[in-house]
Image (spheres, coloured by chain):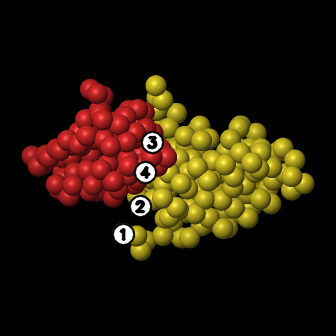
Amino acid sequence: MSAAPAVGIVLVSHSAELAQGAAHLAGQVSGGTVTIIAAGGTDEGDLGTSAAKVTRGLRLADSGAGVVVLPDLGSAVLTVRAVLEDHGGQSVLLADAPFVEGAVAATVTAAAGGDIKAVAAAAEEARHARKL
Amino acid sequence: MPASYEQQITLAGDLHARPAGALAVAAGRFASAVSVTADGRTADAKSVLGVMGLGATSGQHVTVSAAGPDAPEAVAALITILSEATKVGG
């Protein structure tokens, strides 16, 4: 089962550090077998999102099984949607999910061999998970 | 009716994020439905957030249950992970 490519994950945050930290955490929890690309901050390194970073992330994360994208806040969705309009054909799902929990749940499901729909569903179900 | 199996283990350490992740990744590879029960609460073993939400700690008794075509293998694999991964924490 490990021979099949895993779904890739792109974490789009307004903060480069937040995206990198979430990617690190999700990679550690899931055992490091899934490609997780952090696409955070603007091209200048400020707070914001970058179409160029998202585009690069989609390319790097896709190993043939598709990519699930998680935005941190609503306005990151605008950047992702604009990129996706220019990149038709690639198998990409945008998940409406809490950023940290969604990243961890999606990555674990991808590591277990889940397909792109299962990975996106795991991220979206994260909003119902209780911590206490 | 699918075969159902379960086994209990006493945790050697707390069920932190990384052991919970290892458990959920392994559980997700089985076709059977697999659950983890600790202190009267049950989580889907394939849901890392559900497993972490159990808040299971060292010394607690945890039961792994599975129902489906590969239930015995699933229970054995998850018990092994629980016995090894909870020793390292994280």
Query: Do callouts 2 and 4 mark residues in contact (Cβ within 8 Å)?
Result: no
* Residue ID at (30%, 35%): B59
Identify the disc placed on residue B16: 3
Q: Is residue B44 above or below residue A40?
A: above
Q: CA distance from mark 2 to mark 1?
A: 7 Å
Q: Position of residue A64 (x, y in %)?
A: 53, 70
Q: Which residue is identified by label 2?
A: A113
**Chain containing mark 2:** A
Residue type for callout 2: Gly
On screen, residue A7 versus residue B58, left or right, reads right
**Chain containing mark 4:** B
Colour assignment, chain A: yellow
Residue type for callout 1: Met
**Chain containing mark 3:** B
> Dot 2, how many residues are within 10 Å of its Cα: few (below 14), some (14-19), or many (20+)?
many
Q: CA distance from mark 1 to mark 3?
A: 26 Å
Q: Which residue is identified by label 1?
A: A1
Q: Give the structural element (helix, strand or loop) at label 4.
A: loop
Give the label, 4 or 3, closer to the camera.
4
Query: Do callouts 1 and 3 mark residues in contact (Cβ within 8 Å)?
Result: no
Identify the disc placed on residue B40: none
Q: CA distance from mark 3 to mark 2?
A: 22 Å
Q: CA distance from mark 2 to mark 4?
A: 25 Å
Residue type for callout 3: His
Q: Earlier in the sequence, mark 2 or mark 1?
A: 1
Residue A88 visible in image: no
* Residue ID at (38%, 49%): B87
Q: Which residue is identified by label 4?
A: B88
Give the label, 1 or 3, closer to the camera.
3
